Amino acid sequence: AQRVTQPEKLLSVFKGAPVELKCNYSYSGSPELFWYVQYSRQRLQLLLRHISRESIKGFTADLNKGETSFHLKKPFAQEEDSAMYYCALAQGAQKLVFGQGTRLTINP
Amino acid sequence: NAGVTQTPKFRILKIGQSMTLQCTQDMNHNYMYWYRQDPGMGLKLIYYSVGAGITDKGEVPNGYNVSRSTTEDFPLRLELAAPSQTSVYFCASSYGAGAYGYTFGSGTRLTVV
């Protein structure tokens, strides 16, 4: 079965330190993966998708098929990065499966 | 530019009551979804629709019903509210399919007492 695992429910780092939010997936086909972010009192929004190979707000994520991972990284954390982050996998052509989420807190 | 609009934002229900969560999108998206968000559990898919007149069950459909009579609207119905349905509910829409990414509504926080 398709599954997305985010092993850390909570992650706390200091401002300026590197950030890595882990995401592992299980999927038999060619995966399409996403990161969504939910800032305090805001709606969920798409942060980035692996197919675009883009960097948004300094974040990048590389698909590693060998390790079945799609970790989200940022070299220097900023306080405004504090939020809930969800990794998601497109299940077939119709819907997304979400991980449990990681709450990232950036300490000043 | 409204995007996905959900109403109400908050609601308290008594056990056994019924209610409908409304969701409307103005982007002419074919795909629409209802998720519930429980603390530490991520988002679970309740129902989804790939177009007007077509709906299908997600991972946790029990206790819910949906309809899709128009492209714009995708209401979620709770017939007999139970405490286990206390959650935050999100509606989302997508241009083509999950791989295009979703646009989410602001959520409905429902408490069943």
Image: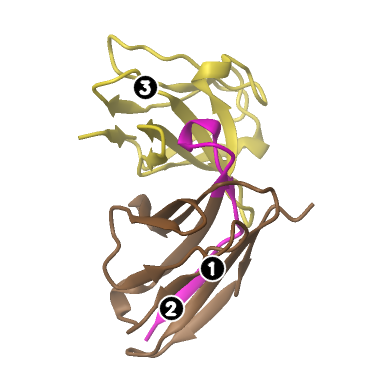
Q: Residue at x 52, y 80 (%)?
A: B11
**Are the residues at dot 2 and dot 1 in contact (C-beta closer than 8 Å)?**
no
Q: Residue at x 49, y 37 (%)?
A: B97
Q: Residue furthest front?
A: B53
Q: Colour of chain B?
A: brown
Range drawn in magenta: B93-113
Observer-nearest of A68 and B99: B99
Marks 3 and 2, how far apart at CA: 36 Å
Q: Which residue is mark 2?
A: B111
Observer-nearest of A5 and A20: A5
Position of B19 relative to A3 (above/below): below
Instruction: Specify the subunit that label 3 lies on.
Output: A
Mark 3 surroundings: few (<14), some (14-19) or many (≥20) residues within 10 A: many
Q: Which residue is mark 3?
A: A31
Q: Are marks 1 and 3 on the same chain?
A: no
Mark 2 surroundings: few (<14), some (14-19) or many (≥20) residues within 10 A: some
Instruction: Specify the subunit that label 1 lies on.
Output: B
Residue A94 painted magenta: no
Q: Residue at x 35, y 44 (%)?
A: A100
Residue B107 painted magenta: yes
Instruction: Specify the subunit that label 2 lies on.
Output: B
Mark 1 surroundings: few (<14), some (14-19) or many (≥20) residues within 10 A: many
Q: Amino acid under label 2? A: Thr
Q: Secondary structure at mark 1?
A: strand
Q: Residue B67: x and y, percent?
A: 45, 67
Q: Amino acid under label 3? A: Pro
Discs 3/2, front: 3
**Are the residues at dot 1 and dot 3 in contact (C-beta closer than 8 Å)?**
no
